[in-house]
Amino acid sequence: MSFEFIEVNPQVAPFVGLIRLNRPKELNALNLQLMGEVKQALAQLDEDEQVRAIVITGNERAFAAGADIKQMAGKTAIDMLKIDQFSTWDAIRKTKKPMIAAVSGFALGGGCELVMHCDMVVASETAQFGQPEINIGVMPGAGGTQRLTRAVGKVRAMEMVLTGKFITAQEAKEAGLINKIVPVELYLEEAIKMASTIAEKSPIAVQLAKESVLKAFDTHLQEGLYFERKNFYMLFATEDQKEGMNAFVEKRKADFKGR
Ligand code: HXC
C-alpha cells in the first residue's frame, strides 16, 4: 500500500493495523485525497484476515485540524454536491472491524468527526476537541451535529457547535466523548494496547458486537434487541464459540481462529 498523505502499517502489533494521518505542516487538514486514502486503507485492512482491530492516529501536535479550508474556500454548493465527499465518510463508517482513535493535539471539525467515526478513543493530555466550523461561516457536515449530540448531550454539543469553543481532553472524558487520557508519550502505545486486547477475542464475535452496539444509534429499543438476539444466536454457529466456552471449562486461554 503506497499513499501520499497517510502511512499504513498493517501489523503494528499482532493482528493490529495502524493508519497515521501524515500532512504535518497543515496539521493533518483532511483534503479530499487524504480522505480517499483513509477510505482505501480501511477497506484493505478490513479485508485483511491478519488484522482484527485498527488504530487511527495523527501526530503529537494534531490528530487533524479539520477539513482542508483552503481546498473548500472557493467552492460553490454545486461543486460540493458533485464532489460528494460524504460518500467517502459513509464508506469509512461501514468499516466492520473496530477502530480506535489515538488522539493528541487538535481534533477539530472533520478531525473531531473522524474521531467520532471510531469506536473508542484514547487521548493524550494535550488533546483538544472542537467543532469550530461556525467560525468560518459553516457548520459540521460529517455527522458532528448528530454524533456529538449523542455522545455529549444537547447543551454541551450546542456550546461546541454554536460557539466553536474547544474542549480539553479532561472535559471530553467527563462528557463521554473519549475513553481514556494518558501522558502524551503514551497515547499511541495505549491505543495499540487497547486494540491488542480486542484482537485477542473472536473476530466474528467482535464484528457482530460492534454492529449491534452501532445499531443502538439507528433504531428503537425493541428492534435493536431483536437485532442483538439474532447476532447472539448466530455466534453459536462459529468454532470460536465452542473454543471460547470449552477453554473456559478447561481452564485454559482460548485460541480464536475467526471461524
Ligand atoms: C487547511 C489548515 C487547517 C485546515 C490548519 N491549517 N488547519 N489548512 N485547513 N483546517 C494550516 C494553517 O493554514 C497553517 O498553514 C498550518 O496549518 C498551521 O496552522 P496555524 O494556524 O499556523 O497553527 P496555530 O496558530 O497553532 O493554530 C492551530 C489551529 C488553527 C487553532 C488548529 O490552525 C485553526 O483554527 N485551524 C482551522 C480549524 C478549523 O476551523 N477546522 C474546521 C474546518 S471545516 P500555513 O501554510 O498557512 O502556515 C471542517 C468541516 C468538515 O472541518 C466538513 C466535513 C468534512
Image (tube, helix red, strand yellow):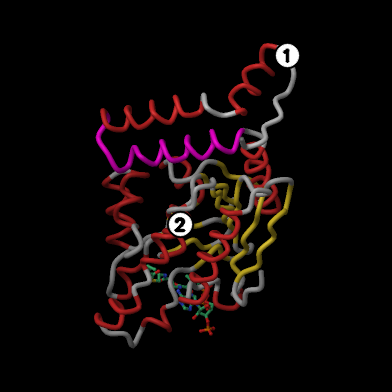
- Give the magenta-colored segment's residue range: 202-221
Q: Which mark is residue 36?
A: none
In the current view of this chain or complex, which residue is farthest to the bottom? 74
Please indicate whether residue 153 sits to the left or right of residue 53 in the image.
Answer: left
Q: Residue at x 55, y 52 (%)?
A: 101
Question: How would you rate the neighbour count of disc 2 (Cα within 10 Å): few for under 14, some for 14-19, many for 20 or more?
Answer: many
Q: Quadrant of residue 63?
A: bottom right
The CB of the residue at mark 2 lies under 8 Å from ligand 1: no
Classify residue 127 as left or right of residue 230.
Answer: right
The image position of residue 85, as x and y in percent, is 38, 71
Identify the secondary structure beneath mark 1.
Answer: loop
For the N terminus, give its image quadrant. Answer: bottom right
Q: Is residue 188 above or below residue 252?
A: below
Q: Residue at x 48, y 72 (%)?
A: 30
Amino acid type for the residue under numbered disc 1: Lys
Q: Mark 2 highlights which residue?
A: 129
Provide the residue designation for mark 1.
Answer: 251
Amino acid bearing label 2: Phe
Residue drawn at x 72%, y 54% as measured from the top left: 11
Provide residue 234's location: percent of width, then percent of height. Answer: 46, 29
**Residues under numbered marks 2 and 1 in contact, where contact means CB atoms less than 8 Å apart:** no
